[in-house]
Amino acid sequence: MIMEILKQKTHTIQDCKVMLDFDLAALYEVETRVLNQAVSRNSSRFPDDFMFRLSQNEWESMSSQFVMTSSSRRPKKALPYAFTEQGIAMLSSVLRSERAVQTNILIMRTFVLIRHYALSHKELSEKLRELEGKFADVYQTLGYFLDKNRLENGQADRKRIGY
């Protein structure tokens, strides 16, 4: 159940799997403001590939895709932070509660499941393309033999004129 919730809270932004600050704050059972303050106090632990702020366009695009249950979860003026898998792992060193550690373990397991799913999906797609290629060869060969058979039967069934 919790894994499904985590999958729903995981988004792809800038070709990265990320979770937004307010979703993480809810999972860690802290206010978004508290989470962001802890991150700000330890900004050296969060380089750009661990965390980034959404652009206005990205936020508008995302917010049109889901409905937030509470307008108090996200201040109107501030754009949310997006945390990559590495950034989420780093959060456990910033938020030191037992709840943060347990939540972080679940989130890491979810990211691993998503990665495995993506890899297996890619492998299945490649196998499907390979099979489609093999079937294309079979259909081409069948077409050749059917055409050849029609030509041979077409000549034999004709009424001969002359000799």
Image (cartoon, rainbow, N blue to C red):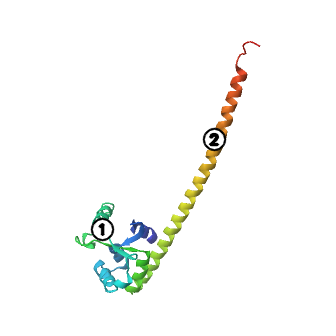
The C terminus lies in which quarter of the figure? top right
**Residue located 25% across and 73% down the image:** 78
Label 1, on which residue? Answer: 55
The kind of residue tagged 2 is Gln
The residue located at (38%, 71%) in the rendering is 19
Query: Mark 1: which secondary structure?
Result: loop
Where does residue 161 sit, x and y in percent of width and height?
72, 13
Estimate the x, y position of residue 25 in percent, counting from the top left: 34, 77
Q: Is residue 44 left or right of residue 114?
A: left
Residue 43 position by quadrant: bottom left
Q: Is residue 159 above or below residue 53?
A: above
Q: Position of residue 97 (x, y in %)?
A: 39, 86
Residue farthest to the front, as pictured: 163
- Residue position marked by numbered label 2 in the rendering: 140
Q: Is residue 135 above or below residue 13?
A: above
**Label 2 SS:** helix
Seen as rendered, the residue at the extreme right is 163
Disc number placed over residue 123 in the picture, else none: none
Measured in 3D between alpha carbons, the distance from the residue under mark 2 to the one under mark 1, in whole angstroms, is 51 Å
Quadrant of the image containing the N terminus: bottom left
* Amino acid found under the numbered disc labelled 1: Ser
Q: Position of residue 35 (x, y in %)?
A: 32, 81
Residue drawn at x 57%, y 58% is 124
**Structural crowding at the residue carrying mark 1, measured as other residues with C-alpha within 10 Å and reported as few (<14), some (14–19) or many (≥20):** few
Task: Work out whether mark 2 precedes mark 1 in sequence or the reverse, and give the earlier one.
Answer: 1
Left or right, 130 with reference to 86: right
Q: Is residue 95 visible?
A: no
Does the CB distance between marks 2 and 1 fall below 8 Å?
no
